Amino acid sequence: MLKLDLPRLERDGSLSFEASVPPDDPLWEGSDLRFEGDVLVRGQASVSGSGEIVVRMRVEGLRIAECRRCLAPVRELLDEDFIVVYGDAGEVGDGEESDIRPLAGDVLTLDLSEALREELILATDRWVECGADCAGLCPICGVNRNEETCDCSPDEPDPRWDALRALQKE
Ligand SMILES: [Zn+2]
Ligand SMILES: [Zn+2]
């Protein structure tokens, strides 16, 4: 799947690639990332003058996240561009924001999947809301207040929400 043919890249100087990663791919295991349908990855790899492999990728997919207030599924269109650089791990500069990944292991293929996973985790918002007016769950009985009303007494508000309410009034 997301593997580059290194000898070919060496020979041609650059290489285009395309892959789709299914939503049940083990790559997403252990992350918060869930998708509806395949995640489409397209990109180009090239060898820089100093020998690093520069990979540009565009990632498109339909992510399913959970509203942090009412826990309903929220669909979010992903369209992200990443640049990943591979090179000798020893060359990482001092203090600079050098994100050079080591070219370890296999000399014939370069596996982009780990980089894709990490970049996507960094790029996606962990705090998603289904809408700006989401009423959330009742803190007392737990019903989804977007769909139902409950008889819980508002006279005994959970003190933990006071700070939040004060912010909302401003
Ligand atoms: Zn919600
Ligand atoms: Zn309630």
Image: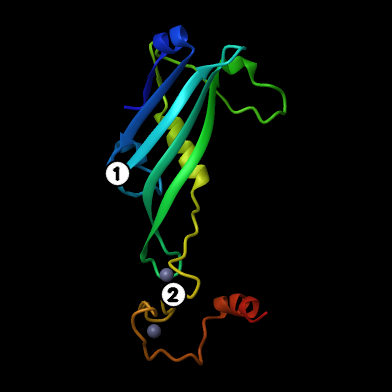
Find disc 2 in the rendering and name its residue.
Answer: 136
Crowding around mark 1 (Cα neighbors within 10 Å: few <14, some 14 to 19, many 20+) is some
| Three-letter code for the amino acid on which mark 1 is drawn | Pro
Find disc 1 in the rendering and name its residue.
Answer: 23
**Residue shown at 36% from the left, 77% from the top:** 144
Q: Position of residue 116 (x, y in %)?
A: 44, 34
| Three-letter code for the amino acid on which mark 2 is drawn | Gly
Q: Is mark 2 within 8 Å of ligand 1?
A: yes
Position of residue 127 in the picture relative to residue 39 (left or right) = right
Q: Nearer the viewer, residue 154 or 111?
A: 111
Q: Position of residue 58 (x, y in %)?
A: 45, 36
Q: Nearer the viewer, residue 149 or 37?
A: 37
| Real-space Cα separation, disc 1 to disc 2, in angstroms | 28 Å
In the displayed structure, would residue 25 be above or below residue 158? Answer: above
Q: Nearer the viewer, residue 135 or 51?
A: 51
Position of residue 96 in the picture relative to residue 149 (left or right) = right
Residue 107 in sight: no
The quarter holding residue 93 reads top right
At mark 1, the secondary structure is loop
Q: Residue furthest right?
A: 95
Position of residue 49 in the picture relative to residue 7 (left or right) = right
Crowding around mark 2 (Cα neighbors within 10 Å: few <14, some 14 to 19, many 20+) is many
